[in-house]
Image: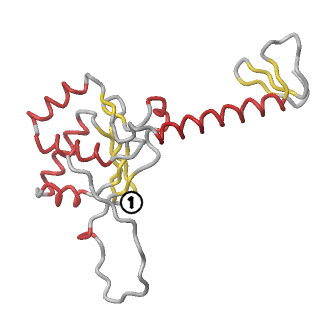
Amino acid sequence: MNKGGYIMGNLAVGATRNILNPNSMTFEERQRQLEEEKKREEEAQARAKKSPYKEFVQVNKEAYKLEDKLMSESPIAYRIFRFLVNNMDGYNAVVCSQTILQEKFDISRTTVFRAIKLLKEKKVLDIYKSGTTNVYSINKNIVWNSWGSNFKHAKFGANVLISESEQQKDEVKLKSVKHKEITLKED
């Protein structure tokens, strides 16, 4: 190995190329290779974002069996699942309080809790905590909202849904702030 070089798997990178090793390259060659890979990834992401299919979700055919069972076992759990799918971002995640689900479906907190518990038991979603807020991540093997090769990033980004009823009603308004308004997608 060249002085100051390194080995990654079977790739040897150093100040000079080792002509006896076909998996050898210089630091400059490796830098160009990494830049080309990054450029290809960015181009693929740009194409995916411009795709007419960006409003589609991909569904595993096996998931239909699960959805049928879910619909018969707990229609409200199925409706909550569909609501989360319709509002998840390109990484299958959405931040949403149980209050939003209560208001959306006009159901009790207990009913929401039971439905979410069932979805978790069926491995339809995972729940992560951010303070007291739930971050729901839909199982990528059931439904997916991005191009198929984006699985490795399944749990990073998230759409955040907030409810007016959960906000503090401040009596003193210090400054007017514009917020982006979104319309929730219906089931």
Q: Residue furthest left?
A: 72
- The residue at 41%/74% (across/down) is 178
Q: Report which quarter residue 5 is drawn in.
A: top right
The residue beneath circle 1 is: 131
Residue 76 image offset from top left, x and y in percent: 12, 45
The percent position of residue 107, horizontal first and vertical second, equals 11, 56
- 146 lies left or right of 41: left
From this view, report whether residue 81 is shown above or below residue 1: below
- Where 117 falls versus 11 (above or below)? below
In the picture, which quadrant includes the N terminus? top right
Relative placement, left or right, of 133 versus 48 is left
Question: Mark 1 is on which residue type?
Answer: Gly
Answer few, some or many: residues within 10 Å of disc 1's Cα (few below 14, many 20 plus, some between 14 and 19): few
Secondary structure of the residue carrying numbered label 1: loop
Q: Residue furthest bottom?
A: 172
Q: Is residue 41 left or right of residue 85?
A: right
- Name the residue rendered at 21%, 50% in the picture: 186
* Towards the viewer: 98 or 106: 106
The image position of residue 15, as x and y in percent, is 90, 29
Colouring style: secondary structure
Q: Position of residue 173 (x, y in %)?
A: 37, 87
